[in-house]
């Protein structure tokens, strides 16, 4: 089991999100209760898939670990 760190690579963030895909559901988000967990997952995966997330990397990792936890498997 791995832990997603603050300076995770794009690939590690993508792997983390893919691992937690099943946790992305219609429950309210912890980081933004206006959104669902699915919407949080979609937004963050979309950002990673679009390309360079250098400026927002620490924000993304902070938000997704708060939402889904820090652990994942590859």
Image: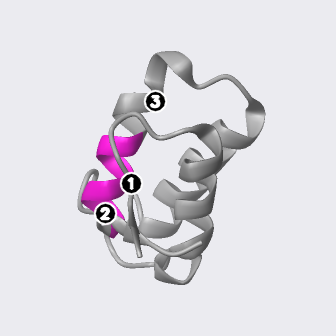
Q: Nearer the viewer, residue 31 or 12?
A: 12
Residue 64 is one of the magenta-drawn residues: yes
Residue placed at 38% from the left, 43% from the top?
61
**Position of residue 57 measured from the top left corner of the image (x, y, whole percent):** 46, 29
Whether tag 2 and tag 1 are in contact, CB under 8 A, the answer is yes
Magenta span: 61-68
Q: Mark 3 or mark 1, which is nearer to you?
A: 1
* Residue that carries the numbered disc 2 in the rendered image: 70
Tell which circle, 2 or 1, labels the residue nearer the N-terminal end. Answer: 1
Q: Is residue 34 visible?
A: no
Residue 56 is one of the magenta-drawn residues: no
Disc number placed over residue 32 in the picture, else none: none
* Residue that carries the numbered disc 3 in the rendered image: 57
Q: Spatial distance from mark 2 to mark 3, Cα to Cα?
A: 15 Å
Q: Quadrant of the N terminus?
A: bottom left
* Residue that carries the numbered disc 1 in the rendered image: 4
Q: Quadrant of residue 35?
A: bottom left
Disc 2: CA contacts within 10 A as few (<14), some (14-19) or many (>=20): some
**Position of residue 51 measured from the top left corner of the image (x, y, whole percent):** 74, 29
Q: Main secondary structure of the magenta part?
A: helix
Q: Residue furthest top?
A: 55
């Amino acid at each position: 089991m791995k832990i997603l760190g603050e300076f995770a690579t794009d690939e590690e963030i993508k792997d983390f999100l893919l691992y937690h895909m099943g946790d992305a559901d219609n429950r309210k988000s912890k980081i933004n209760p206006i959104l669902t967990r699915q919407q949080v997952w979609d937004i963050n995966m979309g950002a990673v898939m679009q390309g360079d997330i250098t400026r927002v990397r620490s924000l993304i990792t902070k938000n997704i670990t708060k939402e889904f936890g820090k652990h994942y498997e590859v």
